[in-house]
Structures are given as C-alpha cells and as structure tokens.
Image: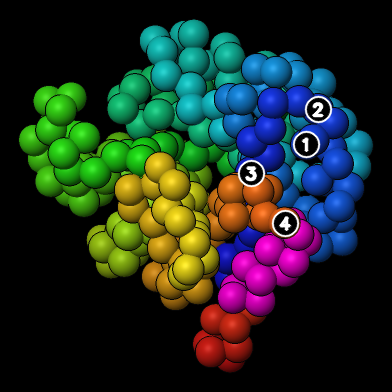
Amino acid sequence: MASLIVALDFPNEKSALDLVDQLHGRVGFYKVGLQLFTACGPDIVRKIRSRGGRIFLDLKFLDIPNTVAQAALEAARLGVDMMTFHALGGEATLRAAGELLARRSAEEGWKTPKLLGVTILTSMDQAALAAIGIDRPLDAMVLHLARIVQSAGFHGIVCSPQELGRLRSSGLTKLLFVTPGIRAAASAADDQARAATAAQAVRDGADYLVVGRPITQAVNPSAAAEQILREIQEVRMERA
C-alpha cells in the first residue's frame, strides 16, 4: 500500500528541517530536490537522516553515461533510499549507473538505493510534448519510457497519477510507481498538468505519493499531511 513522501522544496535548511521536526512521528520519508540540494548541498541529506528521515533524492540525472554513473555514485554514498534519473537519457545511461552502484555497494558495504526513471514530467501535457518535437501520444510515450527503465534493471518509475492504470495493466508489475502531482480535490493544480487526488492515485496503483505544496504551503502542514494519510488509509480499508 502507498506511502507518503513529503517534498521539501525550500530555499534553505532551516525551513526544511523545521518541517521535518514538525512532521516527526507522522511522516518519515522526504524528497530532497534540486532547489534544496542546490541551496544546502549534500549536508542537508545527512541532517535529515540524522533526524530519522528517509531520503528520496530527486535530482533527475541526465547526461552521458559515465557522468551520470559517477554522480549517482556520490549521491548513493550519502545513504539515500531512492534517487531519480531521466529515462530520456536512454537505457545505456541508466544501465551504466545501475551497474556501477551495484558493484561499488558490494565493495564498500552500503545498500543500493532504489533507482527510479522519470518518464514525462507532470507539468507537461500533449501540447508541451509536441512543442519539443515528440509526436507520440503522451500515454504511449510514458509507457515506452517505462519499458526502457524496466529493461535497464531499475526498480521503478516516476509518472503522473493519470498514467497509473495503463501502466499497471501493461505488464510492468515488478516496478515501483512513484507519483507526484497529488492535489486535494478542492485545491489548485499549480503547475501540474496531470494531477489527481491521493485516494485516486492509490486506487490506481501508486506505491509512493510525493506531495509538496499542498502540505508545505498549508496553514497547518501537520493537518494537511494527516489528511493525505487519512485518504491513503481509507483506500486500505476499502481493500481489506
């Protein structure tokens, strides 16, 4: 059943750690993305981990195979639990990272993170794909990239909640599905073009829900997190 990851999309360490402390006992998994990692560096990962938090490092690596593999190695050595790569980098790039991490983790004695391929960003729709020269239908492109991720030996994918149903029915049952773009039914979508509620995403097969602004910008972040957790629990009870 799905777990909640809170996205710490903040410009400074204090804001991020204050929220980790505020949510202690309710949430144990946090996303460190480009903004926070750039502002604070790798030490923010160590500080969240020292508070008992698990880390989803969402840097979406995309470069030539050697560069991606070496960057992923340094990130994995921080002790993160999951990390992301752009599937658009291709199977050779993903495979190079996976093979290097498997080899070095065995040699150095640390646990390999779950490796995730990002399919199509949740801010993009069909028109946005067409604007960069991709004419394949969006859901077909997501499926194509998911199969590349699976072929590379990765553990899972990042996709919007709107593709979950088709992906789950397409033989990709061994992959983890990590789903951003989660919004409350009455809240604004912000810059998410392909969003859904937490309950709908869980029903459609999400393993992890990544939630940022609906929690981090709420008047009461703890209450907002509790609401998401209640939605997850309600789906669990439906299936019991």
Picture quarter with the C terminus: bottom right
Relative to residue 116, is residue 74 depicted above or below?
Answer: above
Residue 102, image x and y in percent?
Answer: 60, 29
Answer with mark 3 or mark 4, whichever residue precedes in sequence. Answer: 3
Q: Which mark is residue 16?
A: 1
> Would residue 153 be seen by someone viewing this image from the given angle?
no
Q: CA distance from mark 4 to mark 2?
A: 20 Å
Q: Which residue is mark 4?
A: 219
Answer with mark 1 or mark 3, whichever residue precedes in sequence. Answer: 3
Residue at 59% across, 55% down? 214
Q: Which mark is residue 135?
A: none
Q: Which residue is mark 2?
A: 13
Q: Which mark is residue 7?
A: 3
Q: Nearer the viewer, mark 4 or mark 2?
A: 4
Residue at 67% across, 55% down? 218
Q: Do tag 2 and tag 1 residues touch (Cβ < 8 Å)? A: yes
Answer with mark 4 or mark 2, whichever residue precedes in sequence. Answer: 2
- Element carrying mark 4: loop
Picture quarter with the N terminus: bottom right
User: In the image, 4: left or right of 206?
Assistant: right
Badge 4: residue crowd in 10 Å (few <14, some 14–19, many ≥20): few
Answer with mark 4 or mark 1, whichever residue precedes in sequence. Answer: 1
- The kind of residue on which mark 4 rests is Val
Q: CA distance from mark 2 to mark 1?
A: 5 Å
The span shown in magenta is 220-232
Residue at 66% across, 76% down? 230
Q: Nearer the viewer, mark 3 or mark 4?
A: 4
